[in-house]
């Protein structure tokens, strides 16, 4: 099975994807990056 670089596929706008799917991927990738930043800055905070 071939490995897929999700970050490159989401960022590469020459990749043929439906615009709605691209929009959802962009939003979800952004949320994951923000979550990683928050966990890194505030690791001991409980929700």
Image: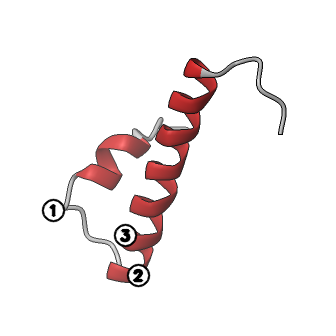
Q: Quick one: which residue is furthest to the left in this view?
A: 14
Q: Label 2, on which residue? A: 20
For mark 2, does the 10 Å Cα neighbourhood hold few (<14), some (14 to 19), or many (20 or more) residues?
few
Q: Residue at x 34, y 54 (%)?
A: 10
Q: Quick one: which residue is furthest to the right in this view?
A: 46
> Viewed as shown, does residue 9 lie left or right of 2?
left
Spot occupied by residue 34 in the image (x, y as percentages of width and height)? 50, 41
Spot occupied by residue 15 in the image (x, y as percentages of width and height)? 23, 62
Label 3–label 2 contact, CB within 8 A:
yes
Q: Quadrant of residue 36?
A: top right
- Per the model, the C-alpha gap separating discs 3 and 1 is 11 Å
Q: Nearer the viewer, residue 31 or 46?
A: 46
Quadrant of the drawing holding the C terminus? top right
In the rendered view, how is the structure colored? secondary structure
Spot occupied by residue 33 in the image (x, y as percentages of width and height)? 47, 39
Q: Residue at x 33, y 72 (%)?
A: 17
Q: Is residue 17 above or below residue 47?
A: below
- Mark toward the start of the polypeptide (1 vs 2): 1
The secondary structure type at the circle numbered 1 is: loop
Q: Nearer the viewer, residue 13 or 1?
A: 13
Nearest to viewer (mark 1 / mark 2): 2
Q: Label 1, on which residue? A: 14
Q: Label 3, on which residue? A: 22
- Mark toward the start of the polypeptide (3 vs 1): 1
Q: Nearer the viewer, residue 21 or 47?
A: 47
Q: Quadrant of residue 38?
A: top right
- Per the model, the C-alpha gap separating discs 1 and 2 is 15 Å
Q: Nearer the viewer, residue 1 or 26?
A: 26
Spot occupied by residue 8 in the image (x, y as percentages of width and height)? 30, 43
């Amino acid at each position: 099975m071939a490995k897929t670089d999700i970050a490159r596929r989401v960022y590469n706008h020459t990749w043929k994807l439906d615009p709605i799917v691209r929009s959802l991927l962009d939003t979800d990738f952004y949320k994951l990056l923000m979550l990683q930043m928050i966990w890194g800055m505030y690791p001991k905070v409980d929700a």
